[in-house]
Image (tube, rainbow, N blue to C red):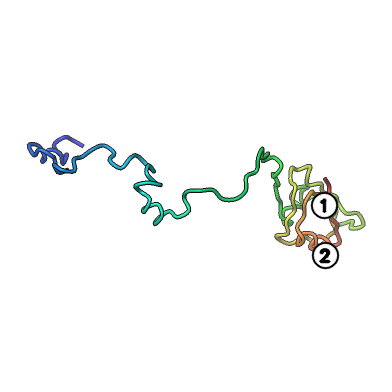
Amino acid sequence: MPTHLHKNRKKRGHVSAGHGRIGKHRKHPAGRGMAGGQHHHRIMMDKYHPGYFGKVGMRHFHKLKNHYVRPVINLDKVWTLIGEEKREACAKDTSKAPCIDLTDFGIFKLLGKGQLPNQPIVIKCRYVSKLAETKIKAVGGAVQLVA
């Protein structure tokens, strides 16, 4: 913006430039950022941000997040792991059910969303939901838990 359009041009010659003689225009009179949240800004913090200060829950020392990694897959995506050609080949001969080991694909938990085609399947995984297990047994399949 060119200088002649700045509002400050109109303030030239007026001593306090619209900021008042008494209060004065100082840099950060109340502190920068969240300063004073437990002191002079306490009313604002209590009113608009209740629960901002303090702790919640239990501490977990030396938490290794790798122990809690649990990639999931839903039932409707299980057959995509081995491909459509394999599924059609298995559909012709239902005496043998294909075995899918989800841990080989880096998946640990099987969830029950979606429908399965009406052909038996054996799935190995570390964790399985109740709904997924009932749907697999309904089509004549089985679930094997592996460590």
Residue at left offset 13%, top offset 39%: 16
Q: Is residue 45 left or right of residue 4?
A: right
- Out of 10 and 83, give the one closest to the viewer: 10
Check the picture and name the quadrant holding the N terminus: top left
Question: Which residue in the structure is indicated by mark 1?
Answer: 123
Q: Is residue 122 above or below residue 23?
A: below
| Residue at the left extreme, as displayed | 13
Q: Position of residue 13 (x, y in %)?
A: 7, 37
Q: Position of residue 65 (x, y in %)?
A: 67, 41
Q: Is residue 131 above or below residue 100?
A: below
- For residue 48, the mark is none
Disc 1 marks a residue whose amino acid type is Ile
Q: Position of residue 81 (x, y in %)?
A: 75, 48
- For residue 138, the mark is 2
Q: Earlier in the sequence, mark 2 or mark 1?
A: 1
Q: Is residue 50 left or right of residue 4?
A: right
Residue at left offset 81%, top offset 62%: 118
User: Circle 2: is it few (<14), some (14-19), or many (20+) Cα within 10 Å?
Assistant: some
Disc 2 marks a residue whose amino acid type is Ala
User: Circle 1: is it few (<14), some (14-19), or many (20+) Cα within 10 Å?
Assistant: many
Residue at left offset 76%, top offset 48%: 83
Q: Is residue 48 left or right of residue 113?
A: left
| Residue at the top extreme, as displayed | 3
- Out of 47 and 105, give the one closest to the viewer: 47
Element at label 2: helix
| Residue at the right extreme, as displayed | 95
- Tags 2 and 1 in contact by the CB under 8 Å rule? no
Cα–Cα gap, marks 2 and 1: 14 Å
Q: Position of residue 85 (x, y in %)?
A: 79, 50
- Out of 57 and 108, give the one closest to the viewer: 57
| Residue at the bottom extreme, as displayed | 138
